[in-house]
Amino acid sequence: MSMALAVDAGLALLILGLGLWIIAVRSSFAAVVGFITYGLVLALVWVRLAAVDVAMTEAALGAGLTGVLLLGAAARLPAEAPGGGPSAGLRVLVAVLCALVAAALAAVVLSLPEPAPSLAPLVAENLPPTGVKNPVTGVLLAHRAIDTLLETVVLIPALIGVWALAADRAWGARPGALTPVPSSSALTLLAQVLPPFGILVGIHLVWAGADEPGGKFQGAAVLAAMWVLVVMAGLADLPKVTSRLMRYTLVLGPLVFVAIGLAGIWSAGAFLALPEGYAKPLIVTIEVVLTLSVALVLGLLLAGPPKERA
Amino acid sequence: MSGVTLFGLCGAALVGLGLYGLICHPGVLRKILAFNLIGSGVFLLFGVIAKRGGGALAAAGTGIDSDPIPQALVITGLVVAFAATAIAVALLLRLVEVGGRGTLEDQAPASNPPHQGPKP
């Protein structure tokens, strides 16, 4: 038991140290690298908290895709002028106030009620009718399906927001934030060898997500990563933002989700309710089409607004 | 003190750290990083509550070791946080393109190249 506590204490110290590094280090590039490391260590913390689904999402999205996004931004920033920001006195004041916020939260953590309130028994009781065995997937797609629906819908306005930042004359071009790296044989080889395995892993994560840890978001993040890798190696080009096929694929997932939800009114008596006996095939259908749409959205969010190529 | 409480305190500290960085760093990229730090601190608090919610049940031998509802919320949150970060980064890169610098500081605009965007 004390061994486990030692591991937890080590992880907590590592997380705090990396957090300090991200805030305190001078160079933006070093801070971003620290953030990626931080995300990977945080994934281990999630495993220690018995949240393997979250750990996978954190590693794939929080560390991986966010890392690529931020590294790309750090590389495009102009050289930073040293200094700037509030004066030393103000900084101390801010530090004190932030420490107070942290202390208040810590006090809340230490005074959480005992025994802890939990909805876990309710979920366990209502999981068998959905036919899936992974409780997190059950919650995401059956019990709290409305949250998941809104989330997948909100990704599309986010993409529209990114595209809206294009310069006027660049509209209709291909997204421009993922410029291919000048020919490097190591990267080309990686982009040729890794995607077949990555695509298999992504599909496995979605398929296994019904019963084991995994699911569409984790699978979609892996698929998006493979796509981005191929684009960055210059082996494939991104579609133009005006491409019809791409736009239809983007909205396919949410549309199928809404259609199945509306059908639930007629077949099971409520919006997003799943008729008995058909819950599992419907959940798997939603997972598969959402994976496609979410992977595409994630990749396009990384690819940034359309840009004219020189 | 259990490991779970330790991670809870860690989450609280991360929120404080991130808040400080968000306020004090002049660079926009650093503000985005700090904001993500706040977010992950909040997610960690969710994870602690989920684990605590399962802890008593696990001790009772029900085979449940965590509450899946906060976990599902965190997964939703991580995806939305990524989308928000992508928009923030796109805004930052546009700011650099139009204004030539990646901070929100008020500086003498002498070195700004005249560019296509509207001048404030």
Image (tube, rainbow, N blue to C red):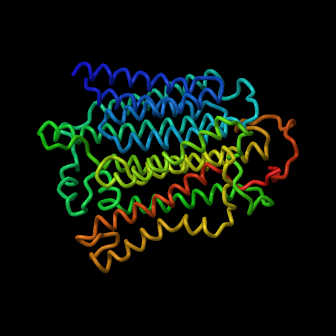
Q: Which quarter of the figure has residue A232?
A: top right
Q: Position of residue B88 (x, y in %)?
A: 62, 46
Q: Image check: A284 left or right of A15?
A: left
Residue at the image position 46 percent from the left and 46 percent from the top: B78
**Extreme-left residue of the structure:** B60
Q: Which quarter of the figure has residue A276?
A: bottom left
Q: Which quarter of the figure has residue A30?
A: top right
**Extreme-bottom residue of the structure:** A266
Q: Position of residue B61 (x, y in %)?
A: 12, 40
Q: Image check: A125 left or right of A207?
A: left
Q: Position of residue B15 (x, y in %)?
A: 46, 34
Residue at the image position 30 percent from the left and 48 percent from the top: A212
Q: Image check: A213 left or right of A173?
A: left
Q: Nearer the viewer, residue A96 or A4?
A: A4
Q: Image check: B60 left or right of A118?
A: left
Residue at the image position 37 percent from the left and 20 percent from the top: A10
B6 above or below A124?
Answer: above
A128 above or below A270?
Answer: above
| Quadrant where the image shows the N terminus of chain A | top left
**Label total for image:** 0
B80 above or below B112?
Answer: below
Q: Nearer the viewer, residue A184 or A143?
A: A184
Q: Position of residue A176 (x, y in %)?
A: 71, 51
Residue at the image position 87 percent from the left and 36 percent from the top: B110
